[in-house]
Image (cartoon, helix red, strand yellow):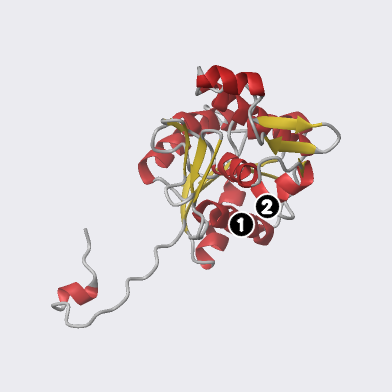
Amino acid sequence: MMLHPQLLNGGATSVAEPMPQPRILIIEDERGLIQSLTWYFNREGYETIVAADGQEGLRKAQTHLPDVVLLDLMLPGLNGLDVCRELRSGERTREIPIIIITARAEETDQVVGFSMGADDYVTKPFSNKVLLQRIKALLRRVEGGAEPNDLVEHLGVQIDRVRHQVTVGKDKLEVTPTEFRLLEVLLRQPGRAFSRHQLMDAAIGEGSIVLERTIDVHVKTLRRKLCAKGCSIDLIETVRGVGYRFRETLPEEHSNRKAE
């Protein structure tokens, strides 16, 4: 491990440590695009790691634990969706933000990408500047900021923004960064109906070009995860013609059963 120069000089002067560079893992097999992205991100002050196939990308993600992963879908060997699935199931990698970059712009590909746990989806060709803004927005959502109310709880579901953790009762719920933000928005105002566009802006980011069905996929995944932790009813309700809301109260019969 390298020591800070001030420590080598006896530590007489107190100098603030430089902030670490955000680390981006680029999993892409197109050589020209790799070179372009690497040059651009390095110029903007980011550390880059590259992998030319899915298996190598998965290994480097597990080894280097990047701040964000840019993941192509069409990769030799292990394809992008399989890499995404493996990252989301790994103990050390499940919370790493993932942005899919691909030439496949079909609706089904986008929905499948989000259902596998991706946080954003950018289609080729794209502007490096626009991609960087998407990365910055995603990192801001993940890091968040300290607020007076960092702990939110309703109907047994608790969100801890400091630890970036969701619990249901005593059980920890594993969620992606986007699912965390979506659940937080709904949980902070139970009973309020949010449109899909409002949820897209809040959970995915303003200006992101994604499908309304993307929110449906995230909600479906959250419902499944909540159900797996013992919730016998849907805590996230569908509001026909509008979008979704977090249940304000439990049905009377359900409350009576819990009281027995």
Per the model, the C-alpha gap separating discs 2 and 1 is: 7 Å
The residue positioned farthest toward the right in the image shown:
241
- For numbered disc 1, what is the local secondary structure? helix
- For numbered disc 2, what is the local secondary structure? loop
**Disc number for residue 137:** 1
* In the foreground, 87 or 179: 179
Tell me where residue 48 appears, x and y as whole percent: 47, 54
In the visual, does 161 lie left or right of 239?
left
Residue at point 65%, 23% (across, down): 252
Residue at point 47%, 51% (across, down): 67
* In the foreground, 43 or 84: 84
Residue at point 51%, 21% (across, down): 259
Tell me where residue 42 appears, x and y as whole percent: 50, 63
Q: Earlier in the sequence, mark 2 or mark 1?
A: 1
Quarter where residue 29 is shown:
top right
Work out whether 168 lies above or below 67.
above
**Disc number for residue 72:** none
* In the foreground, 48 or 183: 183
Residue contact between numbered discs 2 and 1, judged by CB atoms under 8 Å: yes
Q: Quadrant of the N terminus?
A: bottom left
Q: Is residue 99 visible?
A: no
In the visual, does 165 lie left or right of 248?
left
Tell me where residue 53 appears, x and y as whole percent: 51, 35
Determine crowd level at label 1: few under 14, some 14-19, many 20+ residues with C-alpha closer than 10 A. some
Determine crowd level at label 2: few under 14, some 14-19, many 20+ residues with C-alpha closer than 10 A. some
* In the foreground, 154 or 222: 154
Amino acid type, residue under disc 2 in the picture: Gly
Q: Which residue is mark 2?
A: 205
Work out whether 19 lies above or below 13.
above
Amino acid type, residue under disc 1 in the picture: Ala
